[in-house]
Amino acid sequence: MTEAAKEIRDRFERTGASGYAQRTLLIVSDGEPTDGDPREIFATIRKSGVTVIACFVTNEDIADPRTLVASSQSAWTDGARLMWDIASELDETSPFARYLLAQGWSLEPRARLFVQVNHSDVLKEFMRVAGSHFIDESVELLPKGQ
């Protein structure tokens, strides 16, 4: 994961904004790197203006998989905590937030773009958030939600 993060960082540095208003990186992982701690590298990626969406895949039951949280939980595994750490904070006025609210998700204030999934439907739904910034912003999907 650390080597991949370095490659991604270098690629974003080489390509710059490339004319895109929003640069997004979707990470789907078990959160168990075998080559060191990638947190610092992902922090550099986020600071360069890239939105990092982190999806932690687990086989454990998730009580409320359609909720984005604002803080890591003590009961989480190290892998879940790492994935939460690398995720960007959600801008509550963004297309990402509007898309998730339209799908019935709950968003805590100052939540991160991090989810734990153990079901393919939730994974598919959350992965679509990466493309949600292409939604026409003039269309109001929902009033300000949860």
Image (tube, rainbow, N blue to C red):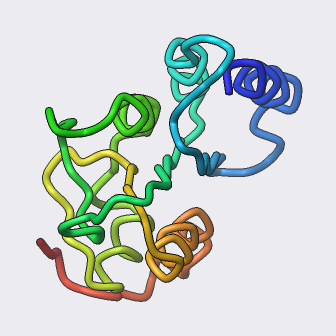
Camera-side residue of 143 and 87: 87
Viewer-nearest residue: 57 or 52: 57
Rendered residue at 50%/55% (across/down): 57
**Does residue 35 sit above or below 23 in this rendering?**
above
Q: Nearer the viewer, residue 20 or 34?
A: 34
Tell me the quadrant of the picture where the N terminus can be found: top right
Q: Position of residue 140 (x, y in %)?
A: 34, 86
Q: Is residue 136 above or below residue 44?
A: below
On the rendered structure, is 107 left or right of 93? left
Q: Nearer the viewer, residue 45 or 35?
A: 35
- Left-right relation of 54 to 143: right
Task: Give the residue displayed 32% in from the left and 35% down from the top.
Answer: 77
Which quadrant: the C terminus?
A: bottom left
Q: Position of residue 136 (x, y in %)?
A: 54, 81
Residue 79: quarter of image: top left
Q: Quadrant of residue 127?
A: bottom right
Q: Is residue 140 left or right of residue 43?
A: left
In this image, 134 relative to 40: left or right?
Answer: right
Q: Quadrant of residue 94?
A: bottom left
Give the number of marks.
0
Q: Residue at x 58, y 18 (%)?
A: 38
Instruction: Point out residue 22 in the picture as x, y percentages from the top left corner.
Output: 62, 51
Q: Is residue 102 above or below residue 22?
A: below
**Residue 121 picture location, percent across and down:** 49, 82
